[in-house]
Amino acid sequence: QDKKLWGGRFAEATDGLVELFNASVGFDQRLAEQDIRGSLAHVAMLGAQGILTAEEVEQITGGLNDVLADIRAGNFEWRLDREDVHMNVEAALRDRIGPVAGKLHTARSRNDQVAVDFRLFTKEAALDLAEKTRALRAVMLAEAEKHVQTEVILPGYTHLQVAQPILLAHWFMAYVAMLERDEGRFRDAAARMDESPLGSSALAGTPWPLDRHATAKALGFARPTANSLDGVGSRDFALEFLSACAILAAHLSRLSEELILYSTFEFGFLTLPDSHTTGSSIMPQKKNPDVSELARGKAGRVFGNLMGLLTVVKGTPLAYNKDLQEDKEGVFDSYDTLSIVLRLYAEMLPKTVWHAETTKAAAARGYSTATDVADFLARGGVPFREAHEVVGGLVGLASRSNRQLWELTDAELRAAHPLLSAEVAGSLTVEESVRSRQSFGGTAPERVREAIEAAKASLSRQ
Ligand code: ARG
């Protein structure tokens, strides 16, 4: 055990359990690259400002690069007694180059150090998830394009009861729209967090003549943060990232739920690929949708990560408090979780087989064209509310006798309303229903083809 980097005023050694409780190196070592990048930018700036000599800068820079090479090669001993990534790196630097290492921390605090490391990480994570979300969007768009060609029909649901027939391609395009916004949320968050807190120092700024614009630029940030208390004390950049993650996870969870339902024997709409399903150790017939169930389940922890950090932050007075050390694991976890789910779905969806006969038959059941019958009457001049009442009566009649609308007799239909007949009921097919929904954003094949073209243009633009 070496002397603590902050040990000056302490007469007694740190309690062992406190050391264990206090240390973050177990997880924040993941920030090592960012930490060293931050230090390299800081030391170069200290040199340019005449705060360190050229020789000191050279020694420290060389040492940091060696430490980085050791870490990358896996030749680095992470020590719990050195508490966190920052002090592990700095102590290792001192082990290598001696006391001059101590000059690195001039005009800097671990508070702005951790804030800059974590912003670098979170910004990269947000941009990476934006790319992965975009890749899944491209896959779902390609699926929509594939299924619009044959105009595969799917039941559209409300309350999980058959509502109106839609195109399967239209269903895919709904997720394409959600994923486009999800990507946008990550990019917006990345743009808003694009500020460097380095040079805020502990909380109040520093008397040293720093060039914060230079370090911000060197680290690829758009600008330095404007307020030193905010720079070290705020974590809304992480909250925003976690909330974009939570919303994306909610979308992926809804998708998962649909895939799970539609793959059941009872629905039979689709078959998931063997490569992305698992078996049961006791029931030989089983083919379980584990990927989708885990994606749905993991949404719970991704939501929890957001709620967890909101709760950590809410009671902390400005500026830094050690509570904020709790900001990292949730961000790492949400990032890792969504990275894998997005990749899995991008692989799995193109290998999923849809059963067009079954989906079309299901779309026809459950009186899914009842609205079309009402619209037919309304087009004949019947007020829509009255038409609704008439068709409601017919649905009641059909369901009591366990028939579909097109199985009602000509006499029954004419009795319900003189404009109706067996011929009319027979012409209201699911294809016709889908074809008729021409409103902008609707499920008619032309509209869906236009939506696909627009989505392709938007995908190639950004
Ligand atoms: N490990 C700490 C964290 O993750 C680094 C900052 C520590 N600063 C302090 N004043 N104790 O938040």
Image (spheres, rainbow, N blue to C red):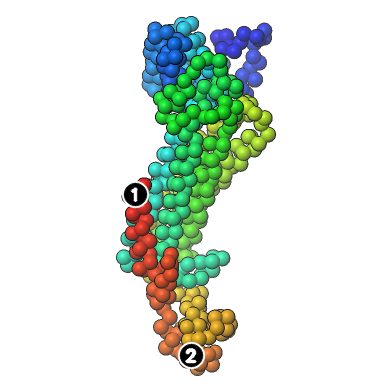
Disc 1 target residue: 461
Q: What residue do we see at 41% from left, 75% from top?
A: 436
**Type of amino acid under label 1:** Arg
Whole-percent x, y for residue 10 in the image: 66, 10
**Type of amino acid under label 2:** Leu
- Among numbered discs 1 and 2, the one appearing first in the sequence: 2
Is residue 362 among what the camera can see? no
Whole-percent x, y for residue 113 in the image: 52, 23
Q: What residue do we see at 65% from left, 20% from top?
A: 18
Q: Which mark is residue 419?
A: 2
Is residue 14 among what the camera can see? yes
Gap between marks 1 and 2, in whole Å?
50 Å
Q: What residue do we see at 44% from left, 11% from top?
A: 50
Whole-percent x, y for residue 32 in the image: 46, 24
For this view, does 25 lie left or right of residue 130? right
Q: Which mark is residue 450?
A: none
Quarter of the picture containing the N terminus is top right
In this rendering, which labeled residue sits more in front, label 1 or label 2? 1
Q: Is residue 147 above or below residue 26?
A: below
